Image (cartoon, rainbow, N blue to C red):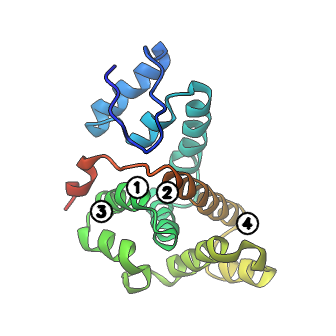
Amino acid sequence: MTHKPVMALDLPPVDPLPPATQKYFDICTEKLGMVPNVLTAHAFDIDLLNGFTALYNKLMLGESNLTKLERELIAVAVSAYNRCFYCLTAHGAAVRELSGNPELGEMMVMNWRVAPLSDKQKAMLTFAEKITMASYTVTEADRETLRSHGFTDRDIWDIANVAAFFNMTNRVASAVDMRPNPEYHAQHR
């Protein structure tokens, strides 16, 4: 494996990758046309990579009443607040893809409040942003607002966990200057 720096830290991937990891990376290449740099960045520690991918896959691709697009909207709204270049680029592309609307992806990256979202989605993103800005200020009134828009308690759990996951990953990506794959920039425009 040729090591191509994807972040400011010199932590090259394990070489060779374990067979299961190599298979996962091959699937990424087949489906996405690349191995996302966030995975390459974690590949210096296979246990860390496996933990990261398991949580990501559960939150973003697992069973939920939230659509994949809604979870990506949360990822982008949180990442916009945190100004995370990596996640805005990667998840902005996902919003463009899932919505079929390049303009929506750009609106979400710049200012989700100008995006043509439902009142329910706006309530979801307001909650996600509050978690991002000052989670200690969340009250029962905030949860009741979500319930009044039709979210269940499980949905609120999912919103909180997706927002929290991206707050963590945004901070790591920014701290280590993780760079998005160049392919993301032109995707789904």
The residue singled out by tag 4 in the image is 153
What percent of the width, then of the height, locates residue 5? 36, 37
Q: Are marks 3 and 4 in contact (CB under 8 Å)?
A: no
Which amino acid, by three-letter code, is at mark 2?
Ser
Of callouts 3 and 2, the N-terminal one: 3
Nearer to us in this view, 33 or 43: 43
Classify 10 Å Cα crowding around label 1: few (below 14), some (14-19), many (20 and above): many
Q: What x and y, as percent, mark residue 65?
A: 58, 59
Name the element at disc 3: helix
State the CA–CA distance, disc 1 to disc 3.
Answer: 16 Å
Q: Which mark is residue 86?
A: 1
Q: Do residues under tags 2 and 4 come within 8 Å of each other at their CB atoms? A: no
Mark 1 or 4: in front is 1
Mark 1 vs mark 3, foreground winner is: 1
Looking at the image, residue 124 sits to the left or right of residue 154; the answer is left
C-alpha separation, residue under disc 1 versus residue under disc 2? 8 Å
Q: Secondary structure at mark 2?
A: helix
Which residue bears the numbered disc 2? 174
Please give the name of the residue rendered at 49% of the width and 52% of the height, measured from the top-left corner. 173
Q: Work out which quarter of the rendered image holds the N terminus and state it.
A: top left
Query: Dot 3 corresponds to which residue?
Result: 96
**Mark nearer the N terminus (1 vs 3):** 1
Q: What amino acid is labelled 4 in the image?
A: Asp
Of the residues under marks 2 and 4, which one precedes in the sequence? 4
Viewport quadrant of the C terminus: bottom left
